[in-house]
Image (cartoon, helix red, strand yellow):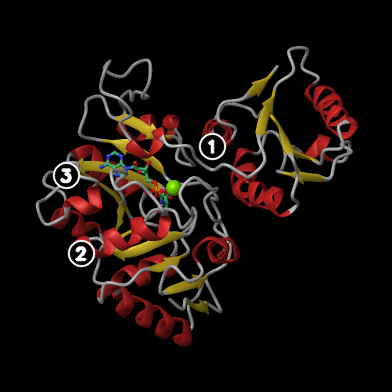
């Protein structure tokens, strides 16, 4: 298949020509095709959420197991009633405060959402993205776009169109280049079908922000979850975000993480291996390695979130044999960043 590549000239204030591009892309989706498009988090691989055949095409393009459900993207709050059986007060409050934005809510689904879209679950994940490109595309496509991140299953989520092209060229109908998103990591996912609400995936909208908005406690999956129920966001059980080279998160017991990473890199060099380092701002200049990526200031979780997936992809391009990453502050957006980094590392930590 030939993948058409188009570029939005003015992502913040769409021109007429941009509108025409999105109309055409919307038609492709209406006709059962698959289009990669930008959002404020990461690029999505979009198809008509109400069309079982389109969802099958998305799974095939991603190489993703079909028990891993897709997020349905909407552009008007009212449309939620078409796909969700019940819309609890909590959902309304969260939408009022955080939509459009990087928050996904799990709700009981209506029958018209096909099992292919929800991986056979009786719930549906719904999100209204902030990206103007995404919301216009959703409108032109008929209102409901099912979209996972636009990477081949297991690879880092794409934050720029060039990374989508790396993975999806020849596999889908169209790639829309709309620049890099502001957020850089995927949406926070909250399950509102359980009580208290459960945060299935941490993100830019933090647990503290959600608890403040709902004036109630939330819980996290894992230790606190009901035993024996398995992973509640099916996608969270798969290997994720992995660059080609093995990745280790480093957190020195004596707090001198840069010193420990320098010794680890030195050992790699003695073996004739190429090393990459994911570093924070103050330390990046001090490393001697084949590739050093400066993720941003250690106390600026938002900057690090914006840079992380690009940095992981660039490690692939630099063809390093091993990657060492500084452990990051586990608070605010940093919690979501550490969640992605540890998944990318397959939980390999050096202390
Ligand atoms: O920011 C984002 O959420 C991006 C952009 C494109 O919107 N999308 C995204 O989709 O990250 P994906 O498919 O890569 O991740 C969706 C996650 C998966 O872990 C999946 O298992 C979970 O959401 N999920 C989807 N529907 C679910 C449901 N009904 N119940 C529980 N988890 C669900
Ligand atoms: Mg994904």
Snapshot quadrant of residue 217: top left
Q: Left or right: where does residue 350 sit relative to residue 111?
A: right
In the depicted structure, whether residue 263 falls above or below residue 162: above
Instruction: Indicate the position of residue 177 as horizontal and vertical percent values.
Output: 53, 71
Q: What is the spatial separation of the Cα atoms under label 3 and label 2, in whole angstroms?
A: 23 Å
Q: Identify the mark nearer the N-term, 2 or 1.
A: 2
Instruction: Indicate the position of residue 255 as horizontal and vertical percent values.
Output: 77, 17
Q: Residue sitting at 74 percent across and 18 percent down?
A: 252
Q: Mark 3 points at which residue?
A: 87
Q: Residue sitting at 44 percent across and 62 percent down?
A: 131
Q: Mark 1 points at which residue?
A: 340
Q: Nearer the viewer, residue 322 or 219?
A: 322
Q: Does the CB distance between marks 3 and 1 fall below 8 Å? A: no
Q: Left or right: where does residue 59 sit relative to residue 333?
A: left
**Residue placed farthest to the top in the image?**
254
In the depicted structure, whether residue 41 falls above or below residue 8: above
Q: Does the residue labelled 3 lie within 8 Å of ligand 1?
A: no
Q: Left or right: where does residue 281 sit relative to residue 148?
A: right
Q: Mark 2 points at which residue?
A: 51
Q: Identify the mark nearer the N-term, 3 or 2.
A: 2
Q: Is mark 2 within 8 Å of ligand 1?
A: no
Instruction: Indicate the position of residue 305 as horizontal and vertical percent values.
Output: 59, 44
How many other residues sit within 10 Å of disc 1, few (<14), some (14-19) or many (≥20)? many
Q: Does the CB distance between marks 2 and 1 fall below 8 Å? A: no
Instruction: Indicate the position of residue 2 as horizontal and vertical percent values.
Output: 46, 78
Q: Identify the mark nearer the N-term, 3 or 1.
A: 3
Snapshot quadrant of residue 299: top right
- Nearer to us of marks 3 and 1 is 1
């Amino acid at each position: 298949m030939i993948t058409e590549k188009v570029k939005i000239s003015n992502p913040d204030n769409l021109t007429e020509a941009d509108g025409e591009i999105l109309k055409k892309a919307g038609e492709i989706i209406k006709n059962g095709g698959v289009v990669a498009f930008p959002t404020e988090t990461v690029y999505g691989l979009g198809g008509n959420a109400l069309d079982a055949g389109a969802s099958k095409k998305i799974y095939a393009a991603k190489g993703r197991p079909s028990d891993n459900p897709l997020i349905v993207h909407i552009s008007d709050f009212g449309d939620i009633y078409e796909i969700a059986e019940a819309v609890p007060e909590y959902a309304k409050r969260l939408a009022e405060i955080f939509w459009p934005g990087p928050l996904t809510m799990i709700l009981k689904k209506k029958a018209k959402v096909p099992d292919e879209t929800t991986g056979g679950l009786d719930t549906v994940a719904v999100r209204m993205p902030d990206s103007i490109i995404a919301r216009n595309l959703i409108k032109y496509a008929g209102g409901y776009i099912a979209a996972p991140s636009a990477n081949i299953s297991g690879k880092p989520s794409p934050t720029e169109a060039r990374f989508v092209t790396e993975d999806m060229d020849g596999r889908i109908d169209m790639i829309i280049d709309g620049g890099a998103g502001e957020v850089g990591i995927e949406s926070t996912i909250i399950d509102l079908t359980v009580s208290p609400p459960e945060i299935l995936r941490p993100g830019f909208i933090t647990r503290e922000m959600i608890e403040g908005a709902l004036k109630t406690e939330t819980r996290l999956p894992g230790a606190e979850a009901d035993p024996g129920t398995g992973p509640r966001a099916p996608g969270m059980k798969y290997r994720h975000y992995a660059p080609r080279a093995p990745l280790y998160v480093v957190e020195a017991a004596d707090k001198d993480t840069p010193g420990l990473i320098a010794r680890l890199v030195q050992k790699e060099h003695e073996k004739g291996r190429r090393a990459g380092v994911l570093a924070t701002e103050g330390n990046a200049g001090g490393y001697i390695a084949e590739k050093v990526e400066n993720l941003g200031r250690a106390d600026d979780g938002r900057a690090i979130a914006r840079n992380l997936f690009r940095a992981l992809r660039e490690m692939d391009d630099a063809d390093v044999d091993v990657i060492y990453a500084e452990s990051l502050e586990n608070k605010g957006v940093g919690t979501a960043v550490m969640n992605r980094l540890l998944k990318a590392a397959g939980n390999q930590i050096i202390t």
